[in-house]
């Protein structure tokens, strides 16, 4: 696990959105001061720009270099590579658990899955990268519902809304995959997948 100080250093290069701890007013002010100092500097190289964008995606989804490379290679052969990559990353069970609000961070979601708290279609899974498909039912294992990880969720009224491709039943700690994740070029994640493909095409 990266210490907060290290995360701040990484986020100063890649952007505040990659870690939950850096999505704060304090970090935003610090980043603004840094950018003001660097405003007079030269623009980065194409390689540097591509590397930064690749790292943004990798840290946002908590992937190893090999995992992201594999996802990008597979998506590159699709008719719409950026859409295919986005769908592949969002369709991971750990990402879905995070999007549902069952976990505060993707890292916490990965731990929930790795520790066997989550079931897919009634079967316990410990694989965070498990790819979800339409019709899949996600729920918290019965023996885990009383855990402090989930106990407060059933009574939580103001949880963030689940994306439209997931239908959540928060009191039951359950959700259904209604469709594949949606993607637009202006997706709120702020990730430039096209630049990631540029990096891997070098």
Image (cartoon, rainbow, N blue to C red):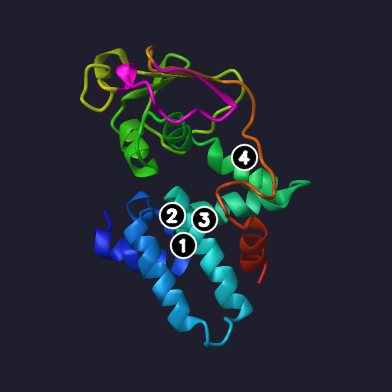
| Callout 4 crowding tier (Cα within 10 Å): few <14, some 14–19, many ≥20 | some
According to the image, label 3 marks what residue? 57
Q: Quadrant of residue 174?
A: top left
State whether the magenta stretch is mostly helix, strand or loop.
Answer: loop
Mark 2 or mark 4: name the one nearer the start of the chain. Answer: 2
In the figure, is residue 127 to the left or right of 117?
right
* C-alpha separation, residue under disc 4 versus residue under disc 3: 13 Å
* C-alpha separation, residue under disc 3 versus residue under disc 1: 11 Å
Magenta part of the chain:
153-170
Q: Which residue is drawn at 64% across and 54% down?
A: 73
Q: Which residue is drawn at 58% across and 55% down?
A: 191
Q: Residue 18 carries which label?
A: 2
Q: Residue at x 43, y 14 (%)?
A: 122
| Viewport quadrant of the C terminus | bottom right
Q: Residue 4 carries which label?
A: none
Q: Residue 87 carries which label?
A: 4
Question: Which mark is in front, 4 or 1?
Answer: 1
Cβ atoms at labels 3 and 1 below 8 Å apart: no
Cβ atoms at labels 4 and 1 below 8 Å apart: no
According to the image, label 1 marks what residue? 15
* Residue 10 seen anywhere in this rendered image of the structure: no
């Amino acid at each position: 696990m990266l210490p907060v100080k290290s995360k701040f250093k990484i986020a100063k290069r890649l952007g505040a959105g990659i870690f939950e701890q850096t999505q704060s007013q304090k970090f935003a002010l610090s980043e603004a001061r840094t950018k003001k100092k660097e405003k007079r500097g030269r623009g980065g190289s194409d390689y540097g720009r591509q590397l930064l964008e690749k790292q943004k995606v990798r840290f946002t989804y908590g992937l190893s270099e090999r995992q992201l490379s594999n996802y990008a290679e597979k998506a590159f052969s699709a008719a719409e590579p950026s859409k295919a990559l986005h769908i592949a990353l969002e369709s991971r069970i750990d990402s879905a658990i995070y999007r549902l609000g069952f976990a505060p961070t993707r890292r916490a979601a990965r731990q929930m899955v790795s520790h066997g708290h989550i079931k897919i279609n009634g079967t316990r899974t410990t694989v965070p990268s498990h790819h979800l498909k339409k019709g899949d039912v996600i729920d918290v294992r019965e023996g885990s519902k009383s855990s402090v990880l989930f106990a407060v969720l059933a009574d939580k009224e103001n949880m963030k809304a689940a994306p439209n491709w997931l239908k959540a039943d928060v009191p039951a700690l359950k959700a259904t995959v209604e469709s594949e994740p949606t993607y637009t070029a202006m997706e709120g994640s702020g990730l430039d997948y096209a630049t990631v493909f540029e990096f891997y095409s070098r």
